[in-house]
Image: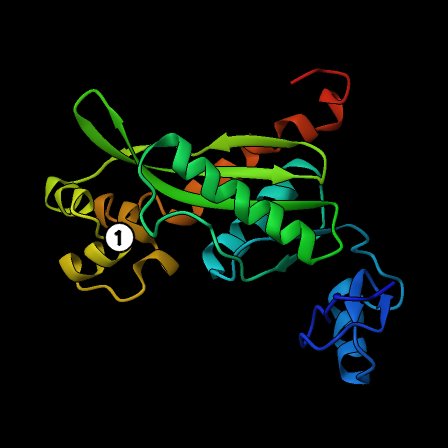
Amino acid sequence: MFESKFCDICGKPAKTYRFGSLLCDNPECLGRAQKLRGGPAGHKLRVVSIGSINPVKVSAVEKALEKTVGNMLVTPVDTESGVSNQPIGFEETFEGAYNRAKSAFEKVNSVYGIGIEAGMVEIGEKKLDIHICVVYNGIDYSVGTSQAFQIPKEISEKLNEGFECGKVAEATYGIKDIGKKNGLIGVLTDDNILREELCINSVVMAMIPKYRRNSEIRF
């Protein structure tokens, strides 16, 4: 039953399924899974996996789910996007989000797998940054986006040369790990809008088909 499955806590071969997690036989992993689930009562009964360990994305998913479908246990999963480090265009950005969502769903026993990918898109002759979110349930997926914002030319020109937006923004503004903080949008808006907000909005948009009131609507 647990062949090729791994402990959600430590990564060793899984031996059992308890508290919404695949677990090895280490009591410490059992205790941690119980704590994450909300204790013996297990008040966080539904598990969602996110295909990223970026704290901004993880926090965004937690907040977006609270806004949409209620309290759920969010499990971060380190996944690969399967696309370039700097996705260009809606299709490649979507593909990265989809791959992350599907991979997260397959690695963790969860209700949904969620993937968020940031990419550069063109509208007219302008280059914009946008976040695309995919919510995958093993059969179908839903998709949503954040607001898009225009990227400064000094950055977009580097992206056309194959550089990654986050790396260029770090070098341009001297902020290490900018993508794990307030993001380029934070710099450009004097922190009036933060990257976490863009991620939250993309998840909320992707969760619209999951609202109870929309259960009879075809999307």
Quadrant the C terminus occupies: top right
- Nearest the eye: 44 or 91: 91
In-image side of 44 versus 130 (left or right): right
Image location of residue 191, percent across then percent down: 29, 49
- Nearest the eye: 31 or 165: 165
Task: State the residue at coordinates (75%, 45%).
Answer: 111
Task: State the residue at coordinates (76%, 70%).
Answer: 33
Relative to 153, say whether 171 is above or below.
Answer: below
Task: State the residue at coordinates (81%, 60%).
Answer: 20
Task: State the residue at coordinates (89%, 62%).
Answer: 41
In the rendered structure, which amino acid carries the disc numbered 1?
A: Glu
In the rendered view, how is the structure colored? Answer: rainbow
Number of marks in picture: 1
Residue bearing the label numbered 1: 164
- Label 1 sits on a secondary structure element that is loop
Furthest-bottom residue in view?
A: 27
Image location of residue 3, percent across then percent down: 80, 66
In-image side of 199 versus 147 (left or right): right
> How many C-alpha atoms fall within 10 Å of the one at disc 1: few (<14), some, or many (≥20)?
some
